[in-house]
Image: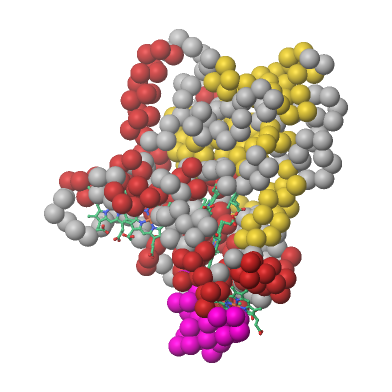
Amino acid sequence: MITIIKYRSIATILFIILLFFTKCINEGKDNADKTLSSHFQKFAGSASCINCHKTIYESHITTAHFHTSEIASENNIKGSFDSGKNKFLYSNGGIVAMERKSNGFFQTAFINGIEKKSQRFDITIGSGTKGQTYLSWAGAKLNQLPITYFTATNQWCNSPGYPDKIAFNRPITSRCLECHTTYAEKLSQPLADPVAIERSRFILGVDCERCHGPAAKHVEFQTQNPNVKSAKFVINPAFFSREQSLDMCALCHGGRLQKTKPSYEFTAGNKLSDYFVIDSANKDATNIDVHGNQIGLLKGSKCFKMSKTLTCITCHNTHENEKGKEALFSQRCITCHNSIHTDAGICKMVVKTGNKIKGKCTACHMPEQKSMAIAVLLQGEVLPTPAAMHTHLIKVYPEETQKVLAFLKKN
Ligand code: HEC
Ligand code: HEC
Ligand code: HEC
Ligand code: HEC
Ligand code: HEC
Ligand code: HEC
Ligand code: HEC
């Protein structure tokens, strides 16, 4: 089979069609000893939610979660294939060119002008907020391609963590997929990496069922019982304890966690520490990198320590793309920071400078900082360039305050 598809229904149809055409093509040894689980059958795919949850579905498909992994295509590969913009030069003279061919998009390596290797962009990882990296199938395994797209400078760069020379053989780990997809069915040992995957049982994107659990039974029940207005067989995080709610997001936003059970076994509602060793050694929030560990940073904040309810979803409506909506986030701060709920009132600065800072709470208290965890080597440079991310260590940042005040004065 040559295709993986986001929705099971489409996948099934394609699967049947492809069977006709590819029956005689040997797929490779990787798939030979497949032991498929029944777990995949429990997923319905988000397309099946449209009929009954249209509003949520339509906004969900605009989120970074939904787009965080997709089949590579003209529509979602961020970088340019135009000549003059489509090459990356290594310091040793090697070149990788991003090429458009009749059968897809490729990264092609040239050494001394001679083509050495060409691999297809099969899957994109990253909606492109900070950057986007690419995976290529090698049998049932996936390798990361040497070149990544870096959004801040709008250019191709050496994939993070790669040496300054061309490499095509870095395998993708199951943990990497666990944070960037909804489900992958593994053919190899559950805990072993690199991971071999059954391509027809791969659900891309961080989709509905990642947070609500596999929902095929819910869809079946609600479809057969249209008069039942309450929900059955689906997880509603609105009823979670604080710990459950944080764990649901910490699975992917809790930094490096070491797994003790096979990937994809954790479901929202479970206790994260039953599935991972939680690294509590790094307790000093000021030392946690801003990449991928919003939990650690938030837990170091007074807002978190001194309130009983604050979780990720106090500020984030994960069904919506709320990126850059400063005023909306500020409104959510004010639900707690008003003279009724805390002694501090809204903010001493509001008293000093007036109401116009009311919509800018996050610019001063959750400023963007450089993340060395998402840092890439740009062409011709020796030091990596970092992406910027909003810190979740909420506190007073005197330097940012000066910058924001200066900005407000000018505008
Ligand atoms: C045939 C209609 C139907 C389909 C299809 C459907 N749902 Fe539902 N769902 C309902 C009804 C009815 C409710 C209860 C009322 C409400 O909350 O909207 C519900 C509620 C929910 C809830 C809230 C749970 C609760 O306890 O209130 C979640 C979460 C949910 N659905 C997720 C999904 C997901 C994910 C899909 C797609 C995989 C899906 N639903 C497909 C009908 C459907
Ligand atoms: C299965 C892993 C996973 C889970 C679970 C998860 N996230 Fe994410 N989240 C990601 C990934 C991966 C990204 C980066 C998406 C991208 O830009 O490619 C992301 C991005 C985000 C963003 C940034 C969106 C943007 O517009 O740039 C927010 C906010 C966020 N997640 C909040 C949450 C919250 C809140 C929860 C818990 C309800 C949660 N996430 C659960 C993996 C996950
Ligand atoms: C612990 C979960 C986790 C693991 C493991 C993980 N990521 Fe991520 N990744 C995230 C989250 C969350 C984000 C969103 C930014 C942030 O919070 O750091 C992200 C961001 C990204 C981005 C930028 C997305 C964008 O739109 O800007 C890329 C590219 C990426 N990851 C690739 C990878 C690759 C490749 C691997 C495996 C080698 C990997 N990630 C492993 C959770 C993870
Ligand atoms: C990143 C995690 C995440 C994803 C992805 C996600 N949800 Fe939710 N969903 C939540 C959380 C958290 C709540 C509880 C929100 C609250 O407490 O207000 C929720 C609540 C709901 C509810 C019940 C409350 C309501 O708002 O009506 C429904 C129905 C629902 N989600 C359906 C969906 C569907 C359908 C999709 C995909 C199209 C989806 N969700 C994707 C996290 C998620
Ligand atoms: C769930 C309630 C809640 C929410 C939402 C909330 N906070 Fe807080 N925050 C608190 C509590 C409680 C404290 C500690 C008591 C105090 O200083 O008022 C606090 C403390 C602070 C402090 C003082 C920190 C320090 O180190 O002295 C700042 C600054 C702050 N919050 C800013 C914000 C901003 C900005 C937002 C929105 C992005 C926000 N808070 C959202 C509850 C909350
Ligand atoms: C007090 C409010 C608040 C809480 C609580 C909160 N966030 Fe955020 N988060 C924000 C704001 C504000 C931004 C910046 C949004 C923007 O401007 O696009 C943000 C941005 C993000 C981003 C994108 C980072 C970037 O700058 O690219 C991710 C990922 C994220 N949050 C995840 C989480 C997770 C996971 C949790 C729970 C541990 C969480 N957030 C809790 C307010 C909050
Ligand atoms: C221009 C930058 C700036 C903006 C915008 C801003 N703050 Fe502040 N905030 C500060 C500074 C500086 C302090 C420390 C003031 C002091 O100690 O005199 C502070 C203090 C605080 C405190 C600690 C208690 C206090 O008053 O000393 C809280 C809580 C707080 N801010 C919340 C908010 C909220 C909520 C918003 C949005 C409505 C906001 N801030 C907007 C700069 C800002």
Q: Looking at the image, which is closer to me, 407 or 66?
A: 407
Residue at the limit of the structure toward the left, as seen here: 227
Q: Is residue 239 magenta?
A: no
Q: Residue at 32% x, 55% y: name it.
A: 234
Q: Residue at 38% x, 29% y: name it.
A: 11
In the image, residue 206 above or below residue 186:
below
| Rendered image coloring scheme | secondary structure
Q: Is residue 350 magenta?
A: yes
- In this view of the protein, can residue 186 be seen by the observer? yes
Q: Main secondary structure of the magenta part?
A: loop
Residue at the limit of the structure toward the front, as seen here: 410
Q: Looking at the image, which is closer to me, 187 or 13?
A: 13
Whole-percent x, y for residue 169 in the image: 70, 28
**First to last magenta residue range:** 332-354
Whole-percent x, y for residue 206 in the image: 47, 47
In the image, residue 74 above or below residue 177:
above
Q: Residue at 49% x, 32% y: name it.
A: 75
| Quarter placement of the C terminus | bottom right
Q: Residue at 65% x, 60% y: name it.
A: 368
Q: Is residue 56 rendered to the left or right of residue 311?
A: left
